Amino acid sequence: MSSGVTPWWRNRRLIPWLLQAVVGLVVLVLVAFLLGNLVRNLTNAGLLLTWSWLGNPSGFEISETVIPFDASMPYWRALMAGLMNTLRVVLFGLFGATLLGVAVGTASFSSNGLLRLLSRIYVELIRNIPLLLQLVFWYFVVFLSLPNGAAALQMPGVVLAKSGLYLSWFDSALQWQLPLLENGVWQAPLRISVEFAALLSGLVIYSGAFIAEVVRGGIASVPKGQWEAATSLGFSPLLTLRRIVLPQALRVIVPGLNSQYISLAKSSSLAVACGFTDLYSVAETTLNQTGRAIEVMLILLGSYLVIDLVISALMNGLSGLVQLRER
């Protein structure tokens, strides 16, 4: 006579947990084996992981930094300076690409046929050319071809020369200071190097094309009746877009922006093509000088991973805010 107790091998709630536990155990054993093998090989080669070299003087200069740095400072400071340069490019890039992408994406719905055509040409032209080639174009063909001295391109408050981009700003006495040419050299309160300008231009224009498509898709997802209802109420096209369409389109746009923002952050590592000293460039120099390939690569991988995870977390939070909540 059956006792009425289900054997454990026929328990449908227990078996999945046991299988997951077995798979997890196998993965842990495999990872432990690989790490043990790595440590043994590094020990035999005399390259066991160590971080003491981070305190040694770096011995190299960085052309432009957000934080004070010179060759006498340690490697960790050099890596930090490179990281700050990367963050500067990423932040300005995200801001510029978003503005450009939103402008071009909304232009796709303009009643002006020429504007719609130009927006399509921009998107199709830019997104089908590799980013690396575009960075090389902006740096070598555009910015390094600019004239210097008195022949530099001069606009109100802005001077664009081969030596950099000079901008008007307040000086130490809080007086508005325009760019001045002194002994053939431009001087201004704010100067942006051509390397930074080329990298930023390439990232903004390239990512802006993809963001424009994300924005266009989001606006297209809003029912046409919303436009017609707003028009019947006397709303202008711009007011309809700003007050009615875009708030609804954000539910579709924000998840797509997440991927584009992460892609821009990762693409910033191509800064070496423009000669800009970012985290990757500093890490490469550090690796060549110290020979600590594994440690340097771990720092590099971890830094970009953290940057992308932060962007993803912020965008996921924003996506949750713009989603409709059922009552």
Image (spheres, helix red, strand yellow):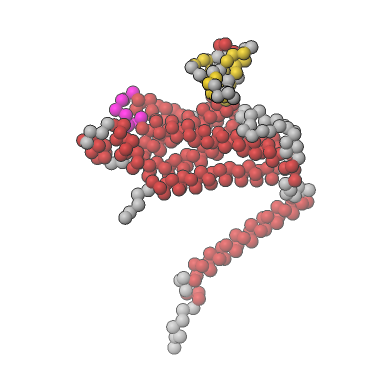
Compared across the picture, whether 97 is left or right of 249 comes to right
Q: Eyeballing the image, is 206 above or below 148?
A: below
Quarter location, residue 185: top right
Q: Residue furthest left?
A: 232
Can you see residue 268?
no
Quarter location, residue 279: top right
Can you see residue 73?
yes
- Residue drawn at x 43%, y 30% is 100
Q: Is 110 inside the magenta-drawn segment?
A: yes
Is 151 or 1 nearer to us in this picture? 151
Question: Total number of numbered labels?
Answer: 0
Is 237 or 144 nearer to us in this picture? 237
- Residue drawn at x 35%, y 49% is 324
Residue 64, x across and y down, in percent: 63, 29
Image quadrant holding the N terminus, namely bottom left
Is 280 or 68 nearer to us in this picture? 68
Image quadrant holding the C terminus, namely bottom left
Q: Residue furthest bottom?
A: 1
Residue 7, x across and y down, in percent: 49, 78
Q: Is 172 inside the magenta-drawn segment?
A: no
Q: Eyeballing the image, is 295 above or below 62?
A: below
Quarter location, residue 265: top right
- Residue drawn at x 29%, y 31% is 237
Is 212 or 197 nearer to us in this picture? 197
Q: What is the span of residues highlighted in magenta in the rendered image?
A: 107-114
Most prominent secondary structure in the magenta stretch? loop
Residue 207, x across and y down, in percent: 47, 34
Compared across the picture, whether 163 is left or right of 318 comes to right
Q: Eyeballing the image, is 22 above or below 186?
A: below
Residue 233, x across and y down, in percent: 22, 36
- Residue drawn at x 64%, y 57% is 31
Q: Eyeballing the image, is 248 above or below 38?
A: above
